Structure formats: C-alpha cells, structure tokens
Amino acid sequence: MHRLPEAKKEAEEKFKEIATAYEILRDDEERSDYDYMLDNPQEYYAHYYRYYRRRMAPKVDVRIVIAVTISVISVIQYYSAWSKYDTAIKYFMTVPKYRNRALEIAKAESKEAQLKGKANRKSKAEQKMEQDRVIRRVIEENLDIRGAYAKPQVVDILWIQLILLPYTITYYAYWYLRWFWKFTIMKQPYGEEEKLYLIRKYMKLGQHQFNALEDEERQQFLDEELWIKDNFLVWKELKDEEAKKALAENNKYKQYRRYIKQHGVGRMTFDDS
C-alpha cells in the first residue's frame, strides 16, 4: 500500500490532518477556538496566539503544583528548625556551666553501670563519643531551650498551620472579642497572661523572642508593672540611657567618635573626570 514515494508522502500528510482534526474536535476549548477562527478569519495573529498558548501551556494541574510547593517549603522549614536546634545543643555542650553539670550526671550513670556489671572496656575515642552522647542527652532532657532555637514541633510546619488555619482564625477572633469585652467594656483588671502580652507588645518582640527570655526577667517586668504604658516608657528611657552610657565607655566607640571629630563623616563620591 502506498508503494510510490509521492503516494506515501500524501498519505502521511492526510494522516496528520486527520489527527489534528481529531485533537481539535476532542477538546472543547480547542474546538471553540477553531469555530471562532472560522467566524473571524481577519484576526490572523490572534488565532496564532491562541493556538501556541494552548500548545505551550503546561498541562500540570495547578492544585498539584501548589501542593508540591507547600510540601517542599514544609520539609525545608522542618529540617531548618532541627538544624537550629542542633546548633543550640552543640553550643550549650561547650558552655562550662551546662557541660560540667552534664558531666556530673554522666559520671553518676557510668558508676551505676559499673556497679551493675554493664560496663565494657572501650577505647579513648569510644569513651569520648559516649561521653558526648550522654552530655547531649542530659542537656536535651534538662535544658529548656525557647525561642527560634527551640525543639521543632510538627504543628509549626506550613502544612499543619494551613490545616489548622480555620481554628487559628476562630481562636484569634474569640481572643480579641474577649479582650474587648473584659478590658475595654467591663474594665476588668488584667491577668498575668494579658500583662505579659502588653509588655511584649510595647517591647515590639515576637512571641519566640519573648519566650526566649529568662523566667526571672519576665517576672521582673511584672514586678515593675511594665504593662502600664507610662511605667514602660520610663523603664525604656532608663534602659536607653544605660545603653548609651555603656556605648560611651566602649573603647572602640571612643576611637570611632575621635575619628569622626577629626575627619568628619565619610561620604561616597563619584569621579566625573
């Protein structure tokens, strides 16, 4: 069949036309564009634009793209949080205060193992690795790391946050309505949670930053009644003065001030020559 080259070529062209017609008729949008082209032949360039836009457009479902993007962000977010936590643990393992306390616990556990006959003879390298492992475990179990370097929680990743979004919105709506009713309308006194919230708000600190502060420091804020705006402004002014005084006594800052006094503030210039 179609032994002659001309006949074979003609059959191939016919097949392409039939295949193209089938593709157009099968797809409702392409068939609609084709009908529009027949009705408006003068819009030559617009027809080409529609055709190539449809041919070159990705066929992937947008929902899949969004789901994959959120998943990638969630994975990166989770492993980044674990990396920060690991960095914090390694840092505290080098701080003498925490390391010595952990060593005491590690030695006590080692003696207990020897008494029970569980101790095995190990090389110095193995003993060092075992010691570091115990120190790390003791620090993880006993040290309360807060803020951005806290131990990661699954609920903090993006996917879970999106799932919990309706609950979060409802909770915050309830929280603000409760605040408005209790403290704006009813003029009730603040509880400890509300006082700490106002202090954090005045200090312009995020929740993680505020949680990273020591309990004694937050208690001091409460003792000084910093949830009262006037008290906070006085406290802030004193802290700013202390910071300026400490900076003025800093040798490097003194050198910088002397340099500015002698040479003036440096400026960036452009040579037009």
Image (cartoon, rainbow, N blue to C red):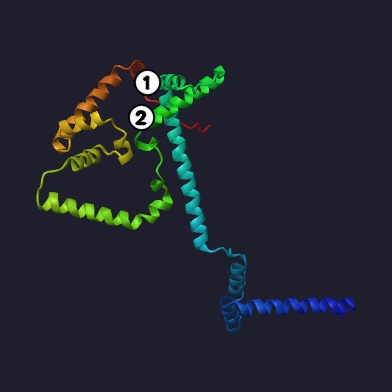
Q: Counting residues from the N terminus, which is met first, the one under dot 1 or under dot 2?
A: 1
Q: Quadrant of residue 139?
A: top left
Residue 31 visible to the viewer: yes
Camera-side residue of 60 and 38:
60
The outermost residue toward the front is: 116
Question: Would residue 35 be found to the left or right of residue 12 on screen?
Answer: left
In the shown orientation, is residue 255 left or right of residue 23? Answer: left
- Which picture quadrant has residue 145? top left
Residue at 50 percent across and 50 percent down: it is 72
Mark 2 burial class by Cα count in 10 Å: few <14, some 14-19, many 20+: few
Residue at far right of view: 4
Q: Which mark is residue 43?
A: none
SS of the residue under disc 1: helix
Where disc 2 sits, the SS reads helix
The percent position of residue 188, horizontal first and vertical second, equals: 10, 47
Which residue type carries mark 1? Arg
Nearer the observer, 216 or 23: 216
Instruction: Looking at the picture, tell me which residue is in the foreground, 114 or 261.
Output: 114
Image location (x, y in percent) of residue 172: 26, 53
- Crowd rating for badge 1 (residues with CA inside 10 Å; few <14, some 14–19, many 20+): few
The amino acid beneath tag 2 is Asn
Residue 10 spot, x, y in % from top left? 81, 79
Q: Are marks 1 and 2 in contact (CB under 8 Å)?
A: yes
Q: Give the number of marks.
A: 2
Quadrant of the rendered image containing residue 221: top left
Provide the residue designation for mark 2. Answer: 142
- Image position, residue 212 (x, y; %): 32, 34
Q: Where's the N terminus, which quadrant?
A: bottom right
> In front: 131, or 58?
131
Rendered position, 14 above or below 104 = below
Q: Which residue is identified by label 1? A: 101
